[in-house]
Image (cartoon, grey):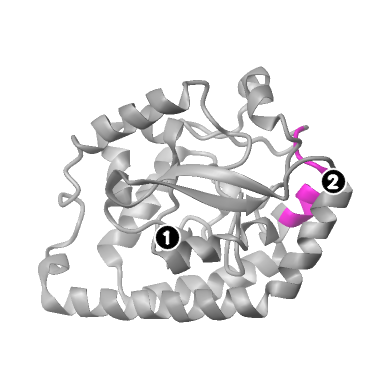
């Protein structure tokens, strides 16, 4: 359930866990990931020394920004944690089980923005889904708490994703990860968007975020990002994300 400075709300996350058992999901994700041609979507230059050097710079920037951000934002974490506790019963953090780089599963964390039984209540709301494809999005989701709406609007719930960036499960800029159920349910070609490390923010998020209702368009933007990737593109997306988050555009 996280979101970071420079982060935007995606379809994956809290309250969106599929109704398969965790063990069954994990086995199916592993099986499907083994079938994906992860190289097919990468540009030819991805196999060169220049690409690898730029990726090393990208990783170094991730570590520096994530470490500094976690340190500087500790007081903000404390205030938000207390606010979550006072606003509604339940845990401070939501454990976010997703699929990342080349089908590798990991657990991230977000500040909890929904009622504790949000996952169990999802099935009763599926007919109100406003997003096409395997992603569930609902503008007036009754499971979101009062504080949760504020945190989501300004992407504050995703701040803990900086820890995932520091660990290497995520990067600051890259295609958003998919929930385990979303990875299973999406078309095979869509899984290729995870040929690179998933990010806290991405081209989709600065191009409309949740106002883009077609999952196919979301994936198209992710694939466009991979084809066009450069350090300069990352810098532009990062700066644009800060502006989008400040305005609270397309987040709910």
Q: Residue at x 52, y 21 (%)?
A: 19
Occupied quadrant, residue 6? bottom right
Q: Residue at x 88, y 50 (%)?
A: 86
Front position in the image: 223 or 20? 20
Q: Residue at x 79, y 55 (%)?
A: 150
- Other-residue count near label 1 (Cα within 10 Å), few / some / many at <14 / 14–19 / ≥20: many
The numbered disc on residue 146 is 2
Residue 125 in the image: above or below residue 196: above
**Between discs 1 and 2, the one toward the N terminus:** 2
- Across and down, in percent, residue 13 comes to 57, 43
Residue position for label 1: 170
Front position in the image: 73 or 149? 73
Residue 20 in the image: above or below residue 186: above
**Magenta region includes residue 214:** no
Helix, strand or loop at mark 2: helix
Residue 209 in the image: above or below residue 141: below
- Other-residue count near label 2 (Cα within 10 Å), few / some / many at <14 / 14–19 / ≥20: some
- Given this view, does label 1 or label 2 mark the residue nearer the observer? 1
Decide if residue 126 is in sight here. yes
The answer for how far apart the CA atoms under marks 1 and 2 are is: 28 Å
């Amino acid at each position: 359930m996280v979101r970071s400075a420079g982060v935007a709300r995606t379809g994956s996350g809290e309250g969106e866990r599929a109704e398969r058992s965790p063990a069954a999901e994990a086995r199916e994700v592993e099986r499907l990931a083994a079938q994906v041609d992860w190289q097919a979507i990468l540009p030819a230059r991805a196999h060169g020394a220049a690409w690898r050097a730029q990726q090393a710079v990208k990783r170094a920037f991730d570590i520096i920004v994530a470490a500094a951000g976690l340190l500087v934002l500790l007081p903000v974490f404390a205030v938000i944690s207390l606010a979550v506790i006072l606003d509604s019963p339940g845990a401070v953090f939501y454990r976010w089980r997703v699929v990342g780089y080349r089908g590798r599963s990991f657990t991230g964390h977000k500040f909890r923005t929904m009622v504790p039984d949000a996952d169990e209540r999802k099935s009763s709301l599926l007919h109100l889904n406003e997003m096409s494809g395997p992603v569930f999005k609902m503008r007036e989701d009754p499971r979101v708490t009062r504080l949760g709406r504020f945190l989501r609007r300004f992407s504050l719930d995703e701040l803990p994703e900086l820890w995932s960036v520091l660990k290497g499960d995520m990067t600051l800029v890259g295609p958003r990860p998919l929930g385990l159920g979303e990875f299973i349910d999406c078309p095979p070609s869509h899984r290729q968007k995870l040929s690179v490390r998933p990010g806290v923010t991405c081209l989709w998020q600065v191009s409309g975020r949740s106002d883009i209702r077609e999952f196919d368009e979301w994936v198209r933007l992710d694939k466009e990002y991979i084809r066009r990737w450069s350090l300069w593109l990352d810098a532009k997306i990062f700066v644009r994300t800060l502006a989008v988050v400040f305005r609270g555009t397309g987040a709910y």
